[in-house]
Image (spheres, rainbow, N blue to C red):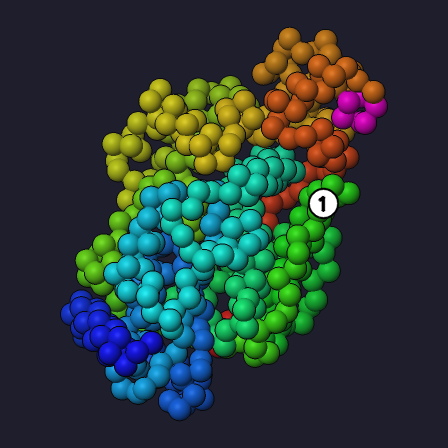
Amino acid sequence: MSAIHEQAMNYVYQQVLQRLMGHFTRAERTALQLLIQRIVVAAGGMEHVGNYKVLIAHGGGEVSSYTLALLRAAQLSIAGRTPKTFHLRVATLRHAGMTQATLGRLNEGYSALFFHDDPRVEVLMVENQEVQPFNHQRPASSAGREVNQRDRLMIGHLTSGDVRATLCTDTYLALGDFYQRVSAWNGGVHALVSGDSARKQSQYLAWLKRSALAAGVAVPPRQSASLNILFARMEEWSTGCYRDLYGEQYVEAQSPGHGGHRHLAYIGVADLLDEVDVASSPLLTEFLAHKPDPFDFHFSHPDYPNPLLMAHLHGLQAQCLRELSYGEGVEAFVRQARDAMSHRHIPDTLIDALGGHDGRVLSTTYAQEFFGLDEGQLTCLLFSPFIHHGERLEGYLRQCHPGMLVGLPELHKALQGKPAADMLQQWLIDTSGLPLPLLQNLYRKRPQQAGRCTQARKRRGAQAQIAQVSGR
């Protein structure tokens, strides 16, 4: 970089910082100074901050978007005081429920923060366990979509059609691999910065440990001594859950390895935001022009990760399993989740329409587009007719496919791995959305209790563990 070009870029960065600071309140300016202090102390002093690299996981939610803007202000503020500032790695986990509109909004935020031409900033995306440069125009991986669809179906069947487990579990398990991969990739990072509360972090860790225990994975009773060890264990637990899910059909992906720095620090900012109304902050609403997407699938509310699809599944569940109408099932869910749906900025007109014909068409289209699942496959998942030697298969056929009752003995043979008519084998595949070997694996397994976020709150020991690791 020539001296003239460097001077011009520094002027641009000063302009970005001035625009940022113009949106800060007094409380936010105080939070910024405290964040700068924490980063400098973690780096070992101002003389070392130029070689320090921090990571933030960014999914487009309000807290992570706000934290990202705060981090950028800290990075540029330090650059205005000293010749060098810390390096920033921004990583996004791209999952099936992430819309193209969400990726576009992420890119707009990165442009507003002037990331793309700054050599001190890495913007990455992880999709289907592959780290790649962030590109909001890259179409979703077809292979990743197929893997995601298969995972959700397997988890849904194994948990007896548990709605939250079907929507949460695969992405939650993927986080174990994600953190290990992005913290170790290309030389690693020195610190993780997060705006999530210790409670939210502990809920996730406790849920992951519960899922690992349910899958028969060894979970050491002692606390992790560092984030590096914690991330490695999270990856191991996730791998163990998938291995239990798929049995002999499991194909292990290449491990992200255990590179990077030996002592990964944690810099929390949740306590700095106590005096800030993040959702209405001009930094978020004006500078980043953040607009919530009701169709975006993220975990700002762990009990209702995707309320639109959850409403659809509750409607199908009421219609097929409870002798109620689709609309009654949706209405019961909406009564329970309306506050959470309003918090996600889902319009009341859309919420009220979910139980009707138009709402059902919208939900069905959404499930097909983002998860590759049609209504018949979702209904099959809710019944979970194949687990535990097909004990629910007859009831499922009577309710949904009475014409197939005559083939019940042959269907059992196919699921047992015995010779059966090709037509019946294909019917099983089409109806479930799963290949026959995986259906045969489900046939041999007992149902599992989902390691849900709501149940994980009871695991106080795990909460204490992550609080100690994070220094909170």
* SS under mark 1: loop
Residue drawn at 39 percent across, 24 percent down: 360
Query: Does residue 456 show up?
Result: no
Residue type (three-letter) at the residue carrying disc 1: Tyr
Percent position (x, y) of residue 354?
A: 35, 28
Quarter of the figure with the N terminus: bottom left
Residue drawn at 67 percent across, 11 percent down: 404
Q: Horizontally, is 200 left or right of 279 in the view?
A: right
Percent position (x, y) of residue 402?
A: 63, 10
Residue drawn at 45 percent across, 36 percent down: 370
In the figure, residue 415 lies in which quadrant?
A: top right
Closer to the camera, 203 or 248?
248
Residue extending farthest left? 22
Percent position (x, y) of residue 377?
A: 56, 26
Vertical order, 359 against 397 (above or below): below
Q: Which residues are the magenta region?
A: 413-418
In the figure, residue 432 lies in which quadrant?
A: top right
Magenta span has 271?
A: no
Q: Horizontally, is 412 left or right of 186 in the view?
A: right
Percent position (x, y) of residue 104?
A: 33, 48
User: Mark 1 sits on what residue?
Assistant: 250
Query: Does residue 111 show up?
Result: yes
